[in-house]
Amino acid sequence: MNDIQLPPIDYAALLPMLIVFGLACVGILAEAFVPRKHRFAVQATLTLAALIAGLVTVIINRDLEVTTIGGAVTIDGAGLFLQGIILVLGIVAFGLIAERRLERGGAFVANAAHAADSDGDKKQLNEAGATEIFPLTLFAIAGMMLFCVSGDLLTMFVALEVFSLPLYLMCGLARRRRLLSQESALKYFLLGAFASAFFLYGVALIYGYAGSVQLVAIKQSVLDSDKSGVLLAAGLALLAIGLLFKAAAVPFHVWTPDVYQGAPTPITALMAACVKAAAFGGLLRVFNVAFETTSWDWRPVITAVAMATMIVGSILAVTQTDIKRLLAYSSIANAGYLLVGVVSLGGAVGSSMFYLVAYGFSVLAAFGMVTLVRDADGEATHLSRWAGLGKGSPLFSAMFTIIMLGFAGIPLTSGFSSKFALFSSAWDANQSALVIVGVLSSVVLAFPYLKVVVLLWLNPPGDETPTVSVPGYLTRAVVGVGVLATIVLGVAPSWLLDMVNSAGTFLAK
Amino acid sequence: MDSITYADATGALSSMWLLVAIPAVSAAVLLLLGKRADKWGHWLGVAAVLAAFGLAVTYFFQLKGLDNRSAALNLFEFIHIGGLEVNVGLLFDPLTAVFVLLITGVGFLIHVYAVGYMSHDPGRRRFFAYFNLFVAAMLLLVLGDNYVMLYAGWEGVGLASYLLISFWYERPAAATAGKKAFLINRVGDVGFALAIFLMFATFGTTDYAKVFNGVLESEAGQTVSAGVLLALGLLLLLGACGKSGQFPLQTWLPDAMEGPTPVSALIHAATMVTAGVYMIARSATIFNANETAQTVVVSIGALTLLIGCIIGCAKDGIKRVLAYSTVSQIGYMFLAVGLGGGAYALGIIHLLAHGFFKAGLFLGAGSVMHGMKDQEDIRRYGGLWKHMKITWATFGLGWLAIIGMFPFSGFFTKDPIILSAFNREGWTGWLYGGAALLGAGLTAFYMTRLFVLTFHGKPRWEMEKHGDHHADGDEAHHAGIKQTADGRDIQHPHESPLIMTIPLIVLALGSVFAGYLMSTSVVDWLTPVLGDAPEEHGRLSHGTVTVLTLGVVVIGAAIAFLLFRNGTELVERPARTHIVRAARNNLYADRFNELVFELPGRLLTRALVWVDNRGVDGIVNGLAAAFGGGSGRLRRLQTGYVRTYALSILSGAVLVVAALLAVRLG
Amino acid sequence: MTPEYYLVLAAVLFTIGAVGVLIRRNAIVVFMCVELMLNAANLTLVTFARINGSLDGQIMAFFVMVVAAAEVVVGLAIIMSIFRSRRSASVDDANLLKY
């Protein structure tokens, strides 16, 4: 009993996460030691390098299938693909976070400790923004990467907190409209902590049922445990709540619109693209690995949640008047479509991951363009202010139109091919009721998007139509990449679908 | 029927993707260049469609020389998930060929016309961009070689139509009409989308060839249940009804006339609204395999054609009447394709002929409105033939064509449909045939009313004094219409410029000759796609039906002529006084006429218009209001209080836990 | 004493915490209620470790404590900043984002 056997660690398999975590720590040091003048350049370079190095190592590892650190981490095809998605979308979102041309000093406040609207706060309006946003971003992304490859529920909980905590902070760092930003941070934090308490309690109950929190062990004990199913059912339910909260499923979606609206737009973009990918990565893994054999238990419940999410998200989107809130509700409805993929299990994993890629690129471009429409007070997000933008800024409006059409699921955009792929696999898995609700809700959802298109092109410009700022190279690249991906994945999605399908599924051994 | 195969495209046909690419690129150029393209943009739009027409003719002649009469071009793989494989592929076969020629040919004429019609509109470049976008999407719709491609084009034309209906956004009616068209079309699209998923689940593919072969095999071996085939047919039909304005989804089409007139002519008369007919004809194999689905198609066609005719009698807006006549003519086409067998080709021929004469009529209506300061109300026209002779002549030819007068095109295309309807087996043949015949009479009535009220009789407007009238007269277009003391409009009607009248003349020639030329040749041409027309020995001979139809048409036209040769009142009389006055004056002969011929018709039409507005519209508007209202109310739940949100999460948690426990223990 | 009582106690604590989040206005107290929920989960973990006869549950409780400590740091920072801006720590006052 004296010598503890350390579990073997496969460092090569963990390398992508080690790089991002490690460079995040280096970023913290840089924050302390690099002179203020150079800090932005150093931090930005470091972050980009970390993300790219992470992506490269993920690609090198692409054929790896290994369980390591005593089962805490499972590297498999689907997990690596999800890590890849998060890194690619993270690199694109980095472009928005590092943009400093639209507003002097960037989108983030210099010193978040100043009370909103105090003298100090007014003074810092023209100071360069805080650079701690970069290590925070890296921590968040590293946490998401870990979340997707967790082999047990405890690792998953830790990863959940690792990526949530930086996000709570980042939400409160907006340069303008400080009060809204702080409020969104508070709401996100309190509700997020509330939801993760449910998650943890669920973990505890499942531990009681299975005697272990490893996903494969849970699967095994579901098959041959003689304990009361109450523990399993209650534990599974509470666990699901924690995950559904992050995924923004009804009725755990309530934080989404407020947080999306109040947070600095680059962070909203990061949440909409990367967090969505991570949350669904986790959901897919938990349900496909640990609870696949009890699917007849949870399927009706998750089906109901998925339907409610699709319906509520699309209906509420109809009357929104703020573009960021509109996109928030659309993100809720899209969570519903992705849940269809979760319910359909195995066959739909590939289509769900494809959906995450397609949606992630479009939503990044959408929020990227939201940062461009500005007036003297910063971003003008009220839709009435967008009327008639097509007259003065046709290129901007054309690109935004493409994104909106993509969200609306018009053919030849990624919105159509991804929905089509997802619904086809769901239909294949005998989830026809979900598909019907999905098609109906996407019909309703198309309406608010097209309303924006009409607003842009056909409505007369108002007296105080804001200007579309000339973006810097970074935002330009983000928007360009997003729009391009929306079209390419719409016209010729098969290469990515092949890649997704050959990535394989979750390792359940 | 043998199994269906399509030969690979060779030679010039392997470049058929250009058909879609050229207008699409032109649209993109027009949209992206912005104001820089304002000066020449419309000519680029016209040139793109002309180029597409040239290509279409080339392809047509190449196709004629091919043995197999089909050319499939597989461009690239679109989606490959599990067992499902969807390719981006194009198919050029006889059915596609006639549609491509119609779309590019008539489309080109309407583009030319629009150069003149939109000449004073500041958004002309944008208009042509959308117009080209529409042509590209419509060509994609007919060229696709599988249902997903068809759906892609389907959504594309819907989008373009939505944008073009709402083109004059400053008019609230236009915005509402656009919204309505969009909503109703989405209802149909849901049906189509579900049909595609069902097809995939049943046959594992959406390629035309494979699906049709699957249906044929299942017919032989009973592998696919009749219920699935029926569901497939009905879902496709729902899609077709939405796009083609058929009962019960017809109400968006007349409202769509709020768009510019060339849009009404191209999209809402000649091409897009016939997409539903194309879809059913293309899916002939599916519908042939299921008699119930066919019966539903026939019934919807017959019902819609009557509804369209009857409401057409009651409308006073020149474009509205034409819109309802479109609804009713498409009803004829649905009737034909629903009859199956040889009648498929009849439906397509009627569609082609209709494309010519209806486009001509709409453009004529546009020309009239152009000369009458955008006045639409036919009660405020009259005697216009003296002032716009070309429009009068071309409109007249279109009128004779649509009512099916010998030897104009409608005669050659509508009569065979009526004949086929009579020859349907069983008692239903009398029913459908009777409906079609009655429809022909009513069409003659309301179209004659339209023609006579517009161009003949005494003017019901006042000639503008020469001193008042501007040199070019165009500023007055948008300045509103002045009226005399007794409520008559002050007008200065004039013929439209050449660029507008030349397309009118060409289309009028089409209305005269197209029917006869196509009536035999196109039937043979379409045989490889739609199957042979079996020799029919029905209960009524061709001669009998022809005589009957012509008789009904002449009677309908004569009644309308007698009733309206002296014009009509400027404003519709309120119903009550009308009845009272009619009762008081019923000793007079003309009042008697009015009572016998007009009153029952009027009551019937009133009732139908009411149902049309309140019933279907009510449902649609109610649905929209329900979503809007529900959305507005649900929004209030988002109170902004963290604790409310926590309550939502907690109650959700309780529900989820309780539900899972219930499932587990229950 | 059977370990099941601890499970019941943990469930009661969890419920008290959850209800506390709903009914308390002060952000700090709300946050403490969340901590209570986390600790209820900890108690459950430790009890199950005892019942299952494995150490995993106890080790997990340590992990959770560390995570909770990190959460406190972030949470207090956020609550502090909003308190300084608004001179109030009531969660009901933060009500600008809605509908």
Image (spheres, coloured by chain):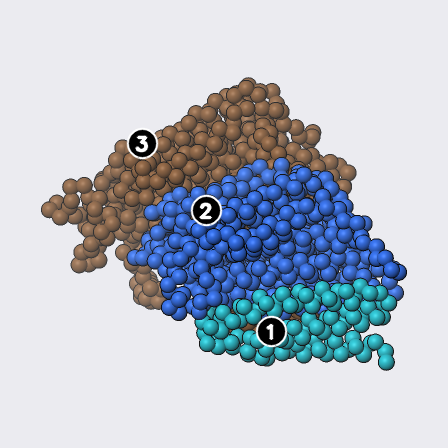
Chain colours: A blue, B brown, C cyan
Distance, label 3 to label 1, CA atoms, is: 78 Å
Q: What residue do we see at 35% from left, 67% from top?
A: B576
Up-down: is A347 above or below B410? below
- Can see residue A328? yes
Chain identity of mark 1: C
**What residue is disc 3 on?**
B502
For marks 3 and 1, give the one nearer the viewer: 1
**What residue is disc 1 on?**
C31
- Can see residue A318? no
Query: Viewer-proximal residue, A384 or B534?
Result: A384
Residue B556 rendering spot, x and y as whole percentages = 40, 46
Give the total number of marks visible in the rendering: 3
Residue A91 rendering spot, x and y as whole percentages = 55, 46
Judging from the image, what secondary structure is the residue with disc 2 in? helix
Amino acid on which the number 3 mark rests in the picture: Ile
For marks 1 and 2, give the one nearer the viewer: 1
Asked whether the residues under marks 1 and 2 belong to the same chain, the reply is no
Residue A357 rendering spot, x and y as whole percentages = 59, 46
**What residue is disc 2 on?**
A475
Quadrant where the C terminus of chain B is found in the figure: bottom right
Distance, label 1 to label 2, CA atoms, is: 37 Å
Left or right: B440, with B664 as reference point: left
Distance, label 3 to label 2, CA atoms, is: 51 Å
Q: What residue do we see at 37% from left, 49% from top?
A: A469
Amino acid on which the number 1 mark rests in the picture: Phe
For disc 1, the neighbor class at 10 Å (few under 14, some 14 to 19, many from 20) is many
Up-down: is B554 above or below A455? above
Chain identity of mark 3: B
